[in-house]
Image: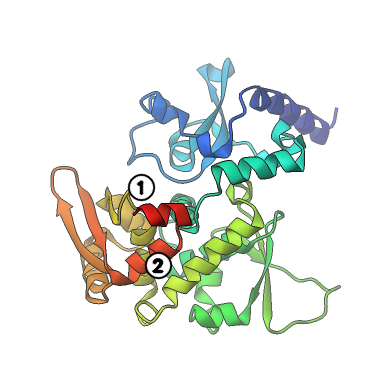
Amino acid sequence: MGEATVQRLVVEHLAGHAQRDALPAYLRTCQCQARGCRWHPRHRGCTGPIALVLTRSGGGRLWRLADVCIACAQATAHSAVVPEAAVPVVERRRPREVKRREQRSHGSPSPRVRIGEMLSYLAAALPPEAGAGARLLALQCALRANGSGRLQIPVGLLRAMRMAQQLGPWRELEEAGWLTPLTLPRLPAVRSRTWVQLLDATVLTQVPGRADRAQGAHAALHLTSSPALRELSASEQLAGLALATHLSPDGMQGAMEAERLARVCAVPPDDLAAVLDRLVAARAAGSWSYDLGSEDITWSLGPVLVDWSRRTLPRHVTASL
């Protein structure tokens, strides 16, 4: 029996387990957190999108298939993410009209939520040395890619991001094994576009439909290229996005461990205070403080981010704020 056949049989077997306990995407949570995170050593908490993770324990006598966040999956020994794109889940076979009714009933995640999830994922997936510019570029690539991880980046987008003449962010992502440039000889040469293939399979299984992705990409670009943020550094733009998307559900304030916020913003922990002060000066943040006991940073949004955050929420949520 060939390796490809064995792999197909294993995926089909896993699909059977996944189908019996299938949950809608909006109900999926990190299961190791529900069990006190006893599946792995202690770390800074759950973060990132939810993935279907297969874990071996007991020397191979026991196997566990569970929904786990990306941060916990990376902290769990002998684990691997199951590519859900390859799992023929029953939900995909439901009539199209049923899917549309459910989407109208439950709604899709707002662009603000989608950007926050992707920033958290990139904080865990990219190496620490990947800079803020590379992470902003990776965010746009992840949200704009098609179902196969392929995308074309218009030169106008790179100009809006102030990256039209920068090769550094591309090289960082390529060296990290996160993407690769594409050569498509059958297509006409188009100098105004850059063709890319994402190599991170987990991103391809976590991103939503193309409409949701496009909304998130446009919302993120709108904020980082706004007059208040476009003159700031890439680290400060990334920090502004992080503050605007990691908020409490019922307000315009947020809180996060200082170490985790620094990782999301791609700045050394000792430099985080200066970055936050510059956001306050730019009226993107209203205020911020550090709690020595919990090691949390709390913040409120300034006028710039408040306006952007309200416009990225669904109308019924905005009306209730």
Distance Cα–Cα, label 1 vs label 2: 15 Å
Q: Name the one closer to the observer, 271 or 305.
A: 305
Q: First in sequence, mark 1 or 2: give its number.
A: 1
On the image, the x and y values in percent for residue 198 come to 64, 59
Labelled disc at residue 308: 2
Element on which disc 2 rests: helix
Q: In the orientation shown, which residue stands out farthest toward the left?
A: 292
On the image, the x and y values in percent for residue 175 come to 55, 63
Labelled disc at residue 249: 1
Question: Badge 1: few (under 14), some or many (20 or more) residues near its Cα, within 10 Å?
Answer: few
Image quarter in which the N terminus is found: top right
- What amino acid type should be assigned to the residue bearing mark 1? Pro
Q: Would residue 27 be visible to someone looking at this image?
A: yes
The residue at 39%/39% (across/down) is: 46
In the picture provided, is 195 more to the left or to the right than 119? Answer: right
Question: Badge 2: few (under 14), some or many (20 or more) residues near its Cα, within 10 Å?
Answer: some
Image quarter in which the C terminus is found: bottom left
Element on which disc 1 rests: loop
In the picture provided, is 285 more to the left or to the right than 46? Answer: left
Please report contact status of discs 1 and 2: CB closer than 8 Å, yes or no. Answer: no
On the image, the x and y values in percent for residue 38 come to 38, 24
The residue at 76%/71% (across/down) is: 183
Name which quarter of the figure residue 100 lies in: top right
Name which quarter of the figure residue 37 lies in: top left
The residue at 55%/42% (across/down) is: 106
Classify 105 as above or below 229. Answer: above
- What amino acid type should be assigned to the residue bearing mark 2? Trp
On the image, the x and y values in percent for residue 296 come to 22, 48
Classify 218 as above or below 53. Answer: below
Task: Please state the total of marks drawn on the protein image.
Answer: 2
